[in-house]
Amino acid sequence: MKSENKPSVCVVGLGYIGLPTAAVIARAGCKVLGLDVSQRVVDTINRGEIHIEEVDLEGLVQGVVSRGLLSAAIEVAPADVFVIAVPTPFDKDHAPDISYVLAAGRTIAPVLKAGDVVILESTSPVGTTEQLRDMIAEMRPDLKVPGLVGETPDISIAYCPERVLPGRILEELTNNDRSIGGITPRCARKALAFYKRFVRGECVTTDARSAEMTKLVENAYRDVNIAFANELSIVSDRMGLDVWEVIRLANRHPRVNILSPGPGVGGHCIAVDPWFIVHGAPKETPLIRTARGVNDGKMHHVIAKAEALVEAHPDAKVACLGLAFKANIDDFRESPARFVTSRLARKFGRRIHVVEPYAAELPIEFTDTGAVQIDIDDALETCDILIVLVDHDVFRVVPLAERADKLVYDTRGIWPDQPRAVREEDARLKLVG
Ligand code: SAJ
């Protein structure tokens, strides 16, 4: 296809999803303008640099910026396709906050023209795409918007959630299947034609509300299943069983696939999105709500167990392994490992040694606690107790010989061969019962 046939694209929000999305669209040959409210972010990208960490992203951004395919700005400009990828947090009562989505709508509405396609990618409660549509209709009475007019609308509006895994974003952006929900089937077809330019996975069309719900369901599904594993780990503690052994054996059943327990669920998605469903149907969601409680409760269980362990060994030096919210990434947002470790640091001060190869320094809440950062080799040489909170590969590969004499509380099950694991000490620590 000749490049002049390619649509110009405006991506609103250049964060963990928006920036990789903008870069992948630009790589497909479309001219992309990325919008962000932060001048620092805009300047960084226009230099061909990035403000977030993601595998291979820097090289891609550098390439598309230098070829003139991607640029960033604060001010909107006309485009053929608008992709909104802004945050949708929740408030203290777990009510979803879609104000950034609506603000993005207000930003683009003045420059919309007939033929444009507007796509919302942000994780959103059911009905948000219609709210966005209503707002555009109100701001632009001159435009025929979909679903509100009988005749062919001037613009198309669709919802298409991302479903990429941090650390594999570029690969998954291209290869994962996508659900594309149109306000009308025509809207879905317009959005489909756009995604076909850069997505190799299958693109399935549906209506906007179903696509919104699908995104929430995917993460709630995972949360509920992790909660099952976390509940099993607490039950196993009480019964003096090794949960990892139980799960390994159960998963040999051809139709059983239990996920892994851990110190709780972190990140910005799985611990958040289930609340959007609960908020939309509070009476009908006891399971989803309880799963959230179980996963949050697991973190407090780990804190209590770790505190008892450290207290029971007053002369021991303690290493906490990992601060990230999951393995092999440098993302410390909403991380149970970080929360557990900072609680221990506040309580036990300089007895706590933090090992996090992905952090250049300790996060702010460790200031003045006395806790220090050391590397894994120092931890293995000098510490007596190891508390494993993240299953980074660099921890996983530590051979038994280097940790055999340590007392280990392994919340991720990375060292099944550990002879002195905390479960054997449970009774002595009075943790059972
Ligand atoms: N976790 C466990 N046990 C497990 C699996 C995960 O405790 O067996 C924990 C992790 O340690 C982490 C949290 O759950 O703290 C979430 O990690 P994750 O790798 O399951 O997911 P995220 O948050 O990195 O990304 C999820 C993905 N959703 C699903 O797998 C259904 C991703 O595809 C979504 O795009 C992303 O949320 C999102 O943006 O919504």
Image (cartoon, helix red, strand yellow):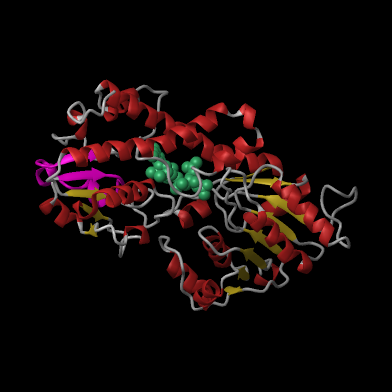
| Above or below, 432 relative to 359 | above
Q: Residue 170, percent across and down? A: 48, 57
As drawn, which residue projects farthest toward the right? 150
Q: Quadrant of ligand 1?
A: top left
Residue nearer the viewer, 24 or 375:
375
What's the residue at 47%, 34% (across, down)? 293
Residue nearer the viewer, 433 or 11:
433
Q: Which residues are magenta?
A: 385-409
Kindly tell me whether residue 194 is visible in this rendering: no
Image quadrant where residue 112 sits: bottom right
| Above or below, 395 relative to 430 | below
**In the displayed structure image, the side of residue 232 where residue 120 appears, left or right:** right
| Above or below, 310 relative to 61 | above
| Above or below, 25 relative to 251 | below
Q: Residue 188, percent across and down? A: 72, 48
Kindly tell me whether residue 349 is visible in this rendering: yes
